[in-house]
Image (cartoon, rainbow, N blue to C red):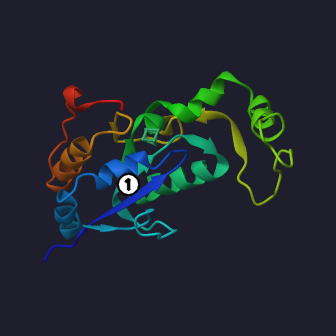
């Protein structure tokens, strides 16, 4: 039996909606797990990535940990796919780019409604928040992008199955939607 294709997935500054869309391929997910082995992923809870064939990255790049994880994915994945609008163009997380980081932190932790103990967190353990939110391809080279919020399950399946069969994936504009 041939070796299984290794896939890693991660959510940077994302909402896990793109991961939910991957799970929405329903019974095809059974076909998928016959063909692939999941490495680092919220689906496996493996925390450290090893060498993989395909990496799926959801979410934008908003803090130093996102940068580190993304660079690690680029280093270890032969094919890197940016999944969803946040990965592609910053999406919803990039809405904060209209304000300074300080304004965002003050609104969230000092001036926001219903705060019990106002104060901007500054624990050394916390990842450093970047001044701006970036799409993934502004930080590393990506091989494919899947638009949509989230990309439909069918689109994810079509791209994955093409790559698994060694075909060039085709992304149809009519499959793109933003729920
Ligand atoms: S693209 Fe949409 S579904 Fe995917 S992480 Fe961003 S907000 Fe969530």
Image point 61% across, 34% down: which residue?
133
Q: Secondary structure at mark 1?
A: strand
- Viewer-proximal residue, 17 or 60? 17
Q: Circle 1 sits on which residue?
A: 55
**Residue 177, quarter of picture:** top left
Percent across and percent down for residue 91 are: 49, 31
> Does residue 92 sit above or below 164 in this rendering?
above
- Viewer-proximal residue, 60 or 177? 177
Can residue 90 be seen in the rendering of this structure? no
Q: Dot 1, crowdedness within 10 Å: few (<14), some or many (≥20)?
A: many
Q: Residue furthest top?
A: 98
Image point 18% across, 42% down: which residue?
168
CB of mark 1 near ligand 1 (< 8 Å): no
Q: Quadrant of ligand 1?
A: top left
Count the marks.
1
176 sits left or right of 1 in the view:
right
Which quadrant of the rendered structure holds the N terminus?
Answer: bottom left
Percent across and percent down for residue 137 are: 47, 37
């Amino acid at each position: 039996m041939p070796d299984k294709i290794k896939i890693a997935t991660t959510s940077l500054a994302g909402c896990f909606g793109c991961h939910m869309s991957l799970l929405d391929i329903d019974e095809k997910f059974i076909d998928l797990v016959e063909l692939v082995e999941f490495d680092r992923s919220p689906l496996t809870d493996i925390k450290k990535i090893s060498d993989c064939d395909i990496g799926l990255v959801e979410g934008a790049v908003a803090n130093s940990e996102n940068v580190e994880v993304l660079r690690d994915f680029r280093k270890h994945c032969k094919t890197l796919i940016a999944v969803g609008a946040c990965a592609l163009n910053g999406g919803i997380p990039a809405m904060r780019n209209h304000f300074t980081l300080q304004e965002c932190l003050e609104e969230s932790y000092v001036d926001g409604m219903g705060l019990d103990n106002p104060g901007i967190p500054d624990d050394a353990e916390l990842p450093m928040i970047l001044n701006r939110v970036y799409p993934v391809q502004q930080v590393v080279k990506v091989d494919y992008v899947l638009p949509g919020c989230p990309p439909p399950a069918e689109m994810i399946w079509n791209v994955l199955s093409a790559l698994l069969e060694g075909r060039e994936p085709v992304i149809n504009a009519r499959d793109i939607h933003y729920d």
